[in-house]
Image (spheres, grey):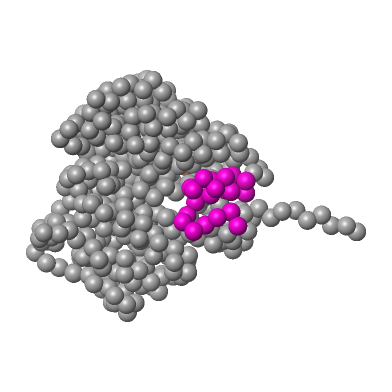
Amino acid sequence: MKHETKPVSPTAVLAAVRPSACPGLVRVVAARDGGLCRIRLPGGVLDAARARALADAALAHANGVLELTNRANVQIRGVRAGEEAALAAALIGAGLGPAGIDAASPVEHACAADELRNVMLSPLAGLDPAAADGTTALAAALIDMMQREPRFAALSPKFALQLDGGERIAMLEHPHDIWLAAQPHGETVRFALGLAGCPTAKPIGALAVEDVCASIRALLHAFLDLAAPDETRMRDVLAAHSLDALLHRAQQHGEFALTRDDAALRAWRRGASDPDLRLGAHALHADGSGYVGAQPALGRIDARTLHALAAVAEASGDATLRVTPWQGFLLPHVAAHAMSATLARLRALGLICTRTEPLARLIACTGSTGCAKSHANTKADALRLAALLPRDAEVHLSGCERSCAAAHLAPYTLLARGPNHYDLYRRDDTASGIGQHFGQRFGQLLAPNLTIEAAAQVLAQQPRSTPDV
Ligand code: SF4
């Protein structure tokens, strides 16, 4: 009897050798609306040619809908069954894969290299003259170091680093397993180091720039030494072991040059970041040149609009885009005389350019059209809420308690209970973020089981001083 041999999909190979529910460029994960492919963009940087390649791939192999994520990455939704390998090959061919990976690379190698690209930078990294220079190159060196060390393939795809140069706009609310933040030090700069938190927290020490890669390498080895099989994040290891035990272990892995404590470190605080600067036109230099920022409604952009955006970046800036963790874009290097025309072109594409627009203050997860776990159609409900949203209110709609759309705690959260029914929570000072007990996770329960219309009424009754992020 003759047996037909079917090609093995990359996703099937990965499910066997490296199980994870986390989508990637090679690992296309099934969702209700088709496959989900996540393309990690180091530093959120996307040049116009690659933006077009992304749009073309989304049309050729999926339903043409793309999403910007809260880690400044891009996702292609609705990947057609059987087209996963062709999609990955198209993306890798366009230079959107990890360095050193091509279409002939072993699938598990490509996947591991892809999943070690979780280093978040400010969307203004290398652009803000008031911030530390060199973070883009340092992030590339960190990624390269991790990809070269076979053992680091064991890190969870969710294990994430933040490298903060002190830019005027940076995401400072997402907890990271390891964070580094530039700190002026005499005539130079060093990096404050923290674990399982954000650069607004107290650092555990500081690293000279030249010691960062080797010291982070030692720290990652120490993490893997101590982590039990079910402990995938730094917070898990720190819950089971003391900080001193972790650092002692790191010292056994070669160079680990951490300055634990000095007066400058104790006095250091990360300067404020203003998320409102993600939208509109902003000068960075004395000649008035700078950047223009915008975001698509609820983080979704169609392939045609992405094509048009690439054309605006070519005509107005340096032919690059920066994806932001607020699910939007910045166009850098816009001349002073081109600022207002660029802003007008982005508005004409239907993008949101000011915080006063209600959809600038709403985020929503995929919802029931794309996710089987969702109790409600969060995207559609967010659009209805936009018409009713009180001035200044910022609201996150989540289809279930996993909170995929927000790694931070929003001022208000609507947690779906059923179609068009949500519990309304308000952030409070005692709730410190994702990972808390479910009842504390979204803050204080204001009202249960509200329709969107009723939620808008409760929001309208809230004091307006509360919700600023
Ligand atoms: S938050 Fe829940 S419902 Fe929404 S996309 Fe994530 S898993 Fe699905």
Q: Which of 316 and 182 is in front in this view?
A: 316
Q: Which of 436 and 223 is in front in this view?
A: 223
Question: In the rendered image, is residue 442 in sight?
Answer: no
- Which residue: 39% across, 65% down? 145
Q: What stretch is highlighted in magenta?
A: 85-104
Q: In this view, does 14 lie to the left or right of 468?
A: right
Is 99 magenta? The answer is: yes
Q: Is residue 148 above or below residue 450?
A: below
Q: Where is residue 381 in the image (x, y as percent from the top left)?
A: 44, 27
Q: In this view, does 325 lie to the left or right of 16?
A: left
Q: Residue furthest bottom?
A: 252
Q: Where is residue 160 in the image (x, y as percent from the top left)?
A: 37, 56
Q: Where is residue 308 in the image (x, y as percent from the top left)?
A: 45, 27
The quadrant of the rendering that contains the C terminus is top left
- Which residue: 36% across, 54% down? 119
Q: Which residue lies furthest to the right in this view?
A: 1
Q: In this view, does 271 lie to the left or right of 411?
A: left
Q: In this view, does 89 lie to the left or right of 48?
A: right
Q: Where is residue 278 in the image (x, y as percent from the top left)?
A: 28, 35
Residue 141 occupies quadrant = bottom left
Total labels: the figure holds: 0
- Which residue: 75% across, 53% down? 6
Q: Is residue 162 above or below residue 318?
A: below
The quadrant of the rendering that contains the N terminus is bottom right
